[in-house]
């Protein structure tokens, strides 16, 4: 670098993640609460997970449904 060149901090820094709509309210997400737009939306989502509003579907194991014990 030459003496005349100065580095402008933050001038061409690209964010690691692109903003996307908040899954709770649809506003643009912010870096501090990604992928949410605010602490409130992040807390609402966490509360739904903890209260059982969201569930991950599980396939039944076919070996256990036939009623026989393999022990």
Image (cartoon, rainbow, N blue to C red):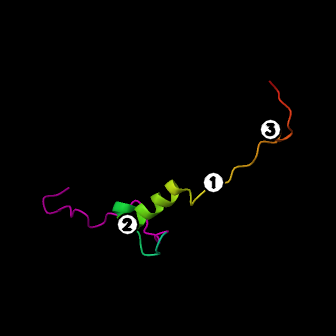
Task: Identify the residue at image location x=21%, y=64%.
Answer: 8
Q: Nearer the viewer, residue 9 or 18?
A: 18
14 horizontally vs 60: left or right: left
Residue range (magenta): 1-23
User: Which residue in the structure is indicated by mark 3?
Assistant: 64
- Is residue 24 shown above or below 33? below
Mark with earlier residue (1, 3): 1
Q: Is residue 59 visible?
A: yes
Q: Is residue 35 visible?
A: no
Reply yes or no: does residue 20 show up in magenta.
Answer: yes
Q: CA distance from mark 1 to mark 3?
A: 20 Å
56 horizontally vs 49: left or right: right
- Tags 2 and 3 touching, CB below 8 Å: no
Q: CA distance from mark 2 to mark 1?
A: 23 Å
User: Which residue in the structure is indicated by mark 1?
Assistant: 56
Q: Quadrant of residue 36?
A: bottom left
User: Which residue in the structure is indicated by mark 2?
Assistant: 40
Task: Identify the residue at image location x=82%, y=37%.
Answer: 63
Q: Secondary structure at mark 1?
A: loop
Category of crowding for the residue at label 1, using alpha-carbon neighbours closer than 10 angstroms: few (below 14), some (14–19), many (at least 20): few
Category of crowding for the residue at label 3, using alpha-carbon neighbours closer than 10 angstroms: few (below 14), some (14–19), many (at least 20): few
14 horizontally vs 8: left or right: right
**Where residue 58 sits: x, y (%)?**
69, 50
- Tags 2 and 1 touching, CB below 8 Å: no
Magenta stretch prevailing secondary structure: loop
Category of crowding for the residue at label 2, using alpha-carbon neighbours closer than 10 angstroms: few (below 14), some (14–19), many (at least 20): few
């Amino acid at each position: 670098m030459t003496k005349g060149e100065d580095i402008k901090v933050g001038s061409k820094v690209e964010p690691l993640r692109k903003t996307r709509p908040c899954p709770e309210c649809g506003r643009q997400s912010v870096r501090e609460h990604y992928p949410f737009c605010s602490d409130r939306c992040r807390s609402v989502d966490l509360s739904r997970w903890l209260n059982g509003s969201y569930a991950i579907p599980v396939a039944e194991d076919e070996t256990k449904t036939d009623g026989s014990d393999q022990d």
